[in-house]
Image: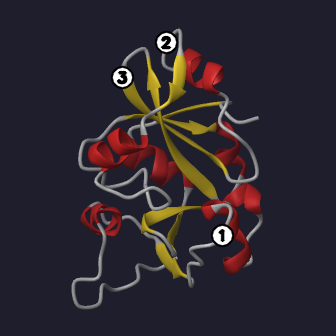
Amino acid sequence: MAKKPKKGGQGTPATVALETAAVPFTVHAYEHDPAAASYGGEAAEALGVAAERVFKTLVADVDGTLTVGVVPVAGQLDLKALAAAVGGKRAAMADPAAAERSSGYVLGGISPLGQRRPLRTVIDASALTHPTVYVSAGRRGLEVELTPADLIALTRARTATIAR
């Protein structure tokens, strides 16, 4: 994988974070359809990639602390498993406005990378079964492909089975 050069300041905080860390990645753009029922499903289909390799970034509230769960778009976030992975008791999906404020991204474009305020992050262990995975690059219609190891390192994430 080679880094895709930025063009005229079109980088996002996620791609800037990857460039700063000198991590190899590839940017994949597609035409976002505002009527799409699932942002992640749309990305997998548009890019011709198995849904198990495209991961969605979800922000949850675990015992009053915002926490990121990164799971395949083919599955759902198991909130109990996410809470257990960080030593918490209760988890619920975060208020959308709080997720946007904290990350600096809009829903459907939240990336686990380059967040305004880095949050504790758990990546579903299934990511480790793929040579590369796709996550949002910080904008609807834009994904980055990178190795699971680089994603884990850059987000300082732990891995656990948090998808069902």
Residue type at mark 3?
Thr
Sequence-earlier tag: 3 or 1: 1
Residue 84, position as x, y percentages in the image: 58, 15
Q: Residue furthest top?
A: 89
Distance from label 1 to label 2 (Cα)?
A: 33 Å
Q: Residue at x 68, y 79 (%)?
A: 46
Residue that numbered label 1 is attached to: 36
Q: Residue furthest bottom?
A: 8
Residue that numbered label 3 is attached to: 65
Residue 4, position as x, y percentages in the image: 40, 83
Q: Nearer the viewer, residue 28 or 90?
A: 90
Check whether the beta carbons of the residues at disc 2 and disc 3 lie within 8 A of each other: yes
Q: How is the image coloured?
A: secondary structure
Q: Nearer the viewer, residue 35 or 42?
A: 35
Residue that numbered label 2 is attached to: 88
Residue type at mark 2?
Gly
Residue 133 visible here: no
Sequence-earlier tag: 1 or 2: 1
> Quick check: 153 above or below 147?
above
10 Å crowding of disc 2: few (<14), some (14-19), many (20+)? some
User: Does 19 sit left or right of 110 as displayed?
Assistant: left
Check whether the beta carbons of the residues at disc 1 and disc 2 lie within 8 A of each other: no
Residue type at mark 1?
Ala
Q: Residue at x 37, y 18 (%)?
A: 64
Distance from label 2 to label 3 (Cα)?
A: 9 Å
Disc 2 secondary structure class: loop
Disc 1 secondary structure class: loop
Residue 66 visible here: yes
